[in-house]
Image: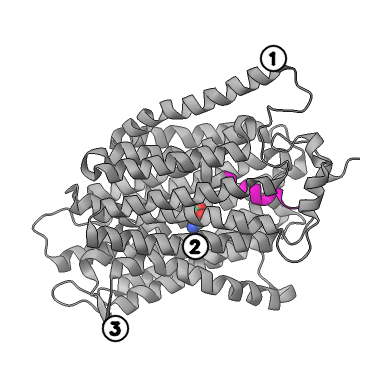
Amino acid sequence: MSSPDHEPSAIEPAGAAIDPRLLAIRSFRGRYPRQLWWLFLAEMWERFCFYGMRGVLTVFMTEQLFMKEDEANLRYGAIQAFVYTMTFVGGFFADKILGFRRSIVWGGLLMMIGSFTIAWSPNELFYIGTSISIVGTGFFKPNISGVVGLLYHDEDHRRDAGFSLFYSGINVGALLGGLLCFRLGDTYGWEWAFISAGIAMICGVTVFSLTASSLGPLGYSPLHEPGQTPAQRTAATRRIQYVYVGSLVAIPLVLLLVSNSAYTDMFMYTVGPLALIYFVWEITRCTREEVQKLSAALVFIFFSIFFWAFFEQSGGSLALVARNHITPVQTLGMTIDPNEVNNSSNSLFVILLSPLIGLLFLSMKKREPNTVVKFGLGFLFLAGAFYIFHSLIFAASAKGESSLSLFTLAYLVITIGELCLSPIGLSAMTKLAPKRLFGIIMGLWFLASAYGQYVAGLLGAGMSEPSDTATSLEKLTAYTDGYLQLTYYAIYCGVALILISPFVRKLMREVS
Ligand code: GLN
């Protein structure tokens, strides 16, 4: 039997497995492969761009495009949902045609062009620039994580540590982008937010391109194999070009879908069921053990939709709460802007807490909770955080302004919840899926985020007070009442997960 490392796959042709450069990469000494640091940096810039734009979206839409708050929440949800749906598409094409390298560079270039397009004329070109960025993120985001996975032998126990370092890279970028883009945009004009996002992408693409040679044979198109005839090579190159052209053609389509709520709804109602049908078709070709593990993965994917729907209030309704209902704090001669706290505290807490939480779980040894219970705990922390967001109303003045400390505390608690679910969920997907379904399972994991984002927008819009004559306090009350509802729903999900944990664990078999 061939060793798992010699198993051929679409992204890693059989010949590549015995390539001495690949063996050298995978037999690295120490905790992390050196390539991981380059990927960390490239992803850091990409997340700078993504979270920088995300952090200004709703405020920009209400203040610059003069949208009502419910409309801005819906648009925010739709934009984010499309971003994550495109990661499903981008992952699929990387696996089958482009390979990771081309996908990352192509995605990065599109994100750069998208950001500069909006910066050129924020009011007129907002949707078209956003659509370009959506398609670009789809090609970049899932595939850079894919490269991280390729740096390890199948049985290398250092993989989780690698993903956790990579998750910190994500959050360093998110922290800087969320902070800087908002500050520049708010102080000098919104175009500066988008210009800085574009510059971040120049850095990301440059870092990746300059260091890609360290990846040896990894990440090339599966269509280009050694020993091909010129005709075969030309045919492969043509298919690659079709994907580039196809992704450009997709931009106006995304523009149409994202700028029209009815189309967004239609799209979201069809794409999920279709992906699920495809997945079930794949499952029918699996062994009984694989079916059981994949069913467990589906449970995680299903619950993660709710998690992201609540969590992602941060770019939507919570951004508006921060803007309109939280009092800035003066300290050490500086003003702490609530939106900067909203955009960056989660990332800061991820960077600070993830090593601590890792150590905590390690120190629990045999008493370490299993993945299902960790997911359940993730929801309970989420519930705690939303109860604190609800409590903003108790600390509110008659003008509808509340406390920044309470707001920040909620972010601390929500981050603990995220760390119980997000990196752990990613790693669980890679453990529960057979290698040949790795792409589709990651695609479904991200698709769940897409649905979460979509529902986040609906929830945010449902919570906002649509009346123009409502007082500031009434508007805040509408949001905080909504957060109380979310608290209850998060508790239901957490308790449900903990109750079904023995059953799901059986499905997971040896995976804990
Ligand atoms: N914050 C993480 C990231 O940006 C996870 C996001 C998600 O899956 N919804 O990669």
Label for residue 171? Answer: 2
Count of numbered badges drawn on the protein: 3
Looking at the rendered structure, the kind of residue marked 3 is Thr
Are the two marked residues, 1 and 3, in contact with CB atoms closer than 8 angstroms? no
Q: State whether label 2 is within 8 Å of ligand 1.
A: yes
Q: Which disc is residue 331 wearing?
A: 3
Q: Which secondary structure, mark 2? A: helix
- The answer to which image quadrant residue 345 occupies is bottom left
Furthest residue to the front? 210
In magenta segment, residue 99: no
Quarter in which the C terminus is drawn: bottom right
Q: How crowded is mark 3: few (under 14 residues within 10 Å), some or many (20 or more)?
A: few
Q: Give the amino acid type for the residue marked by disc 1 in the picture.
A: Ala
Q: Disc 1 vs disc 3: which is toward the camera?
A: 1
Percent of width and height locating residue 352: 52, 74
Q: In this view, does 91 lie above or below 202?
A: above
Callout 1 secondary element: helix
Question: CB of mark 3 within 8 Å of CB of mark 2?
Answer: no
